[in-house]
Amino acid sequence: MACPSISTRSWTERLSARGIEMGAEANPIAAPLAHVVRNRIAGATGVAGLKRLSGGASQETWSFDAITSGDPVQLILRRAPGGERAPSATAVPLETEARLIGLAGGVGVPVPTVRHILAPEDGLGHGFIMNRIAGETIARKILRDDEYANARPKLARQCGEILARLHNIDKASLPPLRTSPARAEIEQYLGVYKAHGHPHPVFDLALRWLKENAPPESTDHTLVHGDFRNGNLMIGPDGVRAVLDWELAHIGDPMEDLGWICVNSWRFGNIDQPVGGFGAREDMFEGYEAAGGAKVDPARVKFWEVLGTLKWGIMCTIMVTAFKSGADRSVERATIGRRSSETEIDLLRLLAPRAKEA
């Protein structure tokens, strides 16, 4: 599963304690990166402050500054692990991710500016360089700190407006992407669920409900971000500053993005605020339609919220498998694995709501 990507403040505060900071003389990517920067960033003479940022991301993320005669240019290198691209059934190549970011920026979606897509002659493997944006991605801070108090009431509507722009990107301009409508998503995660061998009766119930309530196939598919949620949005006191982590982008039902951000796991304890823990569905829907999005179908959004909840539950069980097998013995992996029980409660509340929740 892809993870939040970039920020100045959030990456520094959230991840640097576990990150890797290396002097340029000890870092094997420093020299080729400096060469790329000198050739691609006007007036740049080298790099400084090169720091590996970690914390569960599926890609390498490096923070650094391009040295110039004036102010340094704050940048991020997003690179495949070791520079080598691993095959994936769902994640787009980094080159595609960079192209999608550029297309999104062209229609008014807030995104970092991509400065350069790595080429073979750069000697760094697969990846791209983009601007580093100041802001916060840590949900606990966004939902509770006074610094974001004025932004919180606006965020749900802003999310709707951003998704409307994203979904209106001309499909003819898109790079090759997988198409994954509702029934394909159900079959994909059914296969994953059966493969890991952990029976969950609530998951079985949800899968049956999803098959019975899947929306009919349609031709109104759009670009779907695939992981649009609190945690992948760069937030400042003024609101959303950037949409991050385009790794799971695909062609599908636009209501998928509206349902995913409402999954209870992305409310981070603020369960009465369905949109990311900071707002109401109605505000997001109004923003979406006002910005040119299609008429929202709440029933379809609920379908995708149920499927999103199930998907995250299945992903949590995959974490258990990785921990038990020894592939990843980190405490973080084991802890996330236990959260599958939370999604079972969420699924029961969605499928059999109490009267006041209906």
Image (tube, rainbow, N blue to C red):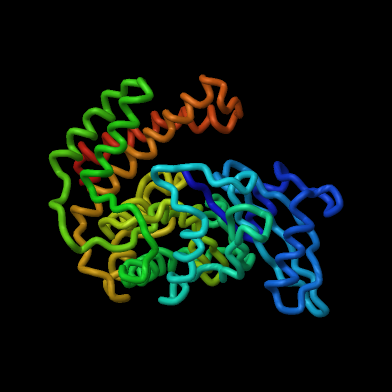
Q: Is residue 287 visible in this depiction of the protein?
A: no
Direction from residue 156 to residue 7 in the image, left or right: right
Q: Residue furthest front?
A: 121
Residue 325 image offset from top left, x and y in percent:
52, 20
Residue 82 image offset from top left, x and y in percent:
64, 44
Q: Is residue 72 visible in this depiction of the protein?
A: yes
Direction from residue 285 to residue 59 in the image, left or right: right
Q: Residue at x 77, y 74 (%)?
A: 44
In the picture, residue 224 is in which quadrant?
bottom left
Placement of 108 over or under 93, stated as above or below: below
Residue 102 image offset from top left, x and y in percent:
48, 70
Q: Residue at x 61, y 44 (%)?
A: 81
Q: Residue at x 23, y 34 (%)?
A: 207
Viewer-closest of 195 and 167? 195
Q: Residue at x 50, y 33 (%)?
A: 336
Placement of 173 over or under 299, stated as above or below: below
Viewer-closest of 84 and 320? 84
Viewer-closest of 267 and 33? 33
Direction from residue 309 to residue 356 in the image, left or right: left
Placement of 70 over or under 285, stated as above or below: below
Count of residue discs:
0
Placement of 162 over or under 268, stated as above or below: below
Direction from residue 258 to residue 57 in the image, left or right: right
In the picture, residue 354 is in which quadrant?
top left
Residue 73 image offset from top left, x and y in percent:
72, 71
